[in-house]
């Protein structure tokens, strides 16, 4: 479901680049920002302790290929603050994610 929302955001981005009027671009940018914010909120990105890593929904999403692709494609559409928070959370839990990848192989 989140991936479908992301596809809509990317489609809005493409349409905005084709839009001729400044008003159309502004309206499209506002809608794109709201959709990206909605996806970001659904991810429930938060800092968690190492005991909670296995249950954290965001980290579990990063354990699957489609989740990783979702994060990579969503990142350019987020605000700088949201992107920084996402990347900080990922890097903070990188040892857990790497260990999980090795175990899955």
Image (cartoon, helix red, strand yellow):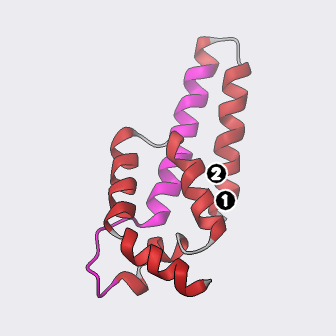
Asked whether, in this view, residue 51 is left or right of residue 14, the answer is: left
Residue 86 in picture, x, y percent from top left = 39, 56
Mark 2 element type: helix
* Res. 3 mark: 1
Asked if the stretch drawn in magenta spans residue 32, the answer is: yes
Q: Residues within 10 Å of mark 1 (few under 14, many from 20)?
A: some
Report which quarter residue 3 is drawn in: bottom right
Going by the image, does 61 lie left or right of 99? right
Q: Quadrant of the N terminus?
A: bottom right
Of all residues, the one furthest to the left in this rendering is 49
Q: Position of residue 42 (x, y in %)?
A: 49, 64
Q: In x, y percent, where is residue 97? A: 45, 74
Does the magenta stretch mainly form a helix, a strand or a loop?
helix
| Residue 12 falls inside the magenta stretch | no
Residue shown at 31%/65% (left/top)? 92
Left or right placement of residue 7 versus residue 28 in this view: right
Q: Residue at x 52, y 40 (%)?
A: 76
Q: Secondary structure at mark 1?
A: helix
Question: Looking at the image, is 104 positioned above or below residue 10?
Answer: below
Name the residue nearer the viewer: 19 or 64.
64
Residue in the picture at 71% in, 31% down? 14
Please determine whether, in this image, residue 38 is positioned above or below residue 26: below
The residue nearer to you, when weighing 9 against 101, is 101
Q: Do the residues bearing badges 2 and 1 touch, measured as CB atoms within 8 Å?
A: yes
Are there few (<14), some (14-19), or many (20+) residues within 10 Å of tag 2? Answer: many
Q: Which disc, if any, is residue 87? A: none
User: What stretch of residues is rendered in magenta?
Assistant: 25-52
The residue labelled by disc 2 is 6
């Amino acid at each position: 479901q989140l991936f479908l929302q992301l596809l809509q955001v990317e489609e809005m981005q493409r349409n905005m680049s084709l839009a001729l009027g400044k008003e159309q671009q502004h309206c499209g940018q506002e809608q794109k920002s709201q959709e990206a914010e909605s996806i970001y909120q659904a991810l429930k990105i938060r800092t968690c302790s190492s005991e909670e890593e296995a249950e954290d929904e965001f980290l579990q999403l990063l354990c699957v290929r489609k989740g990783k692709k979702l994060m990579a494609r969503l990142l350019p559409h987020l605000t700088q603050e949201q992107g920084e928070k996402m990347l900080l959370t990922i890097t903070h839990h990188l040892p857990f994610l790497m260990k999980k990848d090795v175990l899955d192989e």
